[in-house]
Image (tube, rainbow, N blue to C red):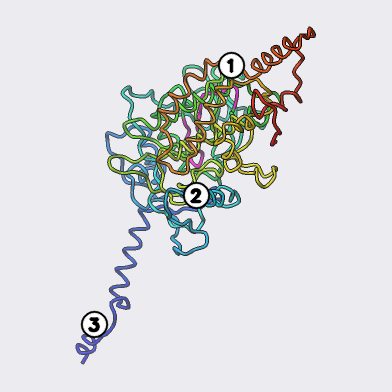
Amino acid sequence: MLIIIIIIIFIFIPPSLSPISNTTHSLSFSLSSSTTQASLPDSYGTTTCKHLASSSSSHSNKQHFSMEIDNKCGCWSLLKRGVSGACKSSSASKHSPNTIPRTSLVYDAATETRYLNASNRELCAPNEARVSSDNPDPPPQENKPPSPLLKFTFQQLKAATGNFRPDSILGEGGFGYVFKGWIEEDGTAPAKPGSGVTVAVKNLKPDGLQGHREWVAEVTFLGQLHHPNLVKLIGYCIEDDQRLLVYEFMTRGSLENHLFRRTVPLPWSNRVKIALGAAKGLAFLHNGPEPVIYRDFKTSNILLDTEYNAKLSDFGLAKAGPQGDKTHVSTRVVGTYGYAAPEYVMTGHLTAKSDVYSFGVVLLEILTGRRSMDKKRPSGEQNLVSWARPYLADKRKLYQLVDPRLELNYSLKGVQKISQLAYSCLSRDPKCRPNMDEVVKAMMPLQDLSDLAILSYHSRISQQGRRKKKSDGTPHLTYTQSKSIRASPLNSSKQHR
């Protein structure tokens, strides 16, 4: 009788309710949980990775740093191996109101306005399912092996920064605070302020918005990539829960500070030099044997040395680009509103042309002295790209875009060329945007231009004086006079500022 009852149970009870089936499912879930990472989406669309149990043992041919990270946190070993699905967030309904529609890469003006003006929404919708894993893939390999990164102890960096005192803070971002410090020239020992080598120490907040994932990405990329227009990573510290990075100190701070927070306007020649240097940095990243997409190109990430040489910093969101026959990388949508390419925001398809779009936005900021997003301006002028596009397309109006603080101290041909480049980089069709090599080639001659608008103005005044046979000389150019002719260097026009 007992045998008959058991047979009936196996025949009529669905497998999903079977005790054996439940045991199998439970075991499967346990195994998968041990090889994936928990993630918490933050307000910037990035993901903070949680520590896992200890990872599998490192191979003997791994570098010392990789072995150390493997032992400290399983997240590194998963990222290195490129496990699909690592650091995924919970999936959501495809019809969620927060889900970004997967539409065509070519968009119209209305779509552009819809997405670029939505600065109050995260770039990565909280409930959006990840299209693929977003791991900091290995960067391009250099022909010359990079110098090894220095390993600092937490106490060394604490002493180098004066116990992380508030008056040594250089800045703050999603990662945490950046402090000014000093170390000895030939090692990791702290030095007295004003002696040794000046460095910038970035300290990860325990609850930082970027978190461990971005810390790993910075070490991965900047530890191997070396170029005059990339900031140099000197070393790192990984000690218990402490995550710190040590960079070369950039004397003049960020481009953002010089454009928007200084009383004295940044001279035109320096603006061109900075834009060219930043373009060279992006071109280097895009053209390696294994391309890298920067993904967070903006004025605050462009740092300047004493001679105004531009260097790209903050590689926490960098991503290995498509290779072979692949046209794009499908990834989570992160970055900064006002700079991110609309087709990337809408589809999650990342290409080098996404960086080109961001470069176009920065060119506009350099040209106009306006922020990419400025809620303090009238509604039609809050988004820089939307406001400036009609002027870029009209040669008679493009001079109205020039930063008024420059007065007429800019190159006529330089403004024309910068405007053309910005217009091309901001094309709604990514395929129509130039690559960064083409941008660098177009910008090289702009350094030597000397056709200042103010000289043209004085020449006109002088000619008018001779015709009228006046002997009072060239009148002094006031700010009001220069502003009245900025619509065109040769004609006066109403301003739109």
Check disc 2: other Cα within 10 Å, few if <14, some if 14-19, many if 20+: few
Given residues 86 and 207, the one toward you in this image is 86
Verify CB contact (< 8 Å) between mark 3 and mark 1.
Answer: no
Does residue 238 belong to the magenta stretch? yes
Check disc 1: other Cα within 10 Å, few if <14, some if 14-19, many if 20+: some
Q: In whole angstroms, how far apart are the C-alphas of marks 3 and 1?
A: 90 Å
Disc 2, SS: loop
Q: Which residues are magenta?
A: 236-253
Query: In the displayed structure, does residue 479 sit left or right of residue 223?
Result: right
Check disc 3: other Cα within 10 Å, few if <14, some if 14-19, many if 20+: few
Name the residue that disc number 3 marks: 10
Q: Residue furthest right?
A: 472
Disc with the residue nearer the chain's start (2 vs 3): 3
Disc 1, SS: loop
Disc with the residue nearer the chain's start (3 vs 1): 3
Given residues 120 and 371, the one toward you in this image is 371
Q: Residue furthest bottom?
A: 1
Q: In whole angstroms, how far apart are the C-alphas of marks 2 and 3?
A: 60 Å
Verify CB contact (< 8 Å) between mark 2 and mark 1.
Answer: no
Q: Find residue 154 and report its horizontal and vertical position in percent.
A: 52, 32
Name the residue that disc number 1 marks: 451
Q: How many marks?
A: 3
What amino acid is found at the position of numbered circle 2 in the picture? Asp
Q: Which mark is residue 108?
A: 2
**Which marked residue is nearer to the observer: mark 2 or mark 3?**
2
Query: In the displayed structure, does residue 369 sit left or right of residue 483?
Result: left
Residue at horizontal 37 percent and vertical 24 percent from the top = 146
Main SS, magenta region, reads: strand
Residue at horizontal 56 percent and vertical 45 percent from the top = 337
Tell me the quadrant of the picture where the C terminus can be found. top right
What amino acid is found at the position of numbered circle 3 in the picture? Phe
Q: Which mark is residue 493?
A: none
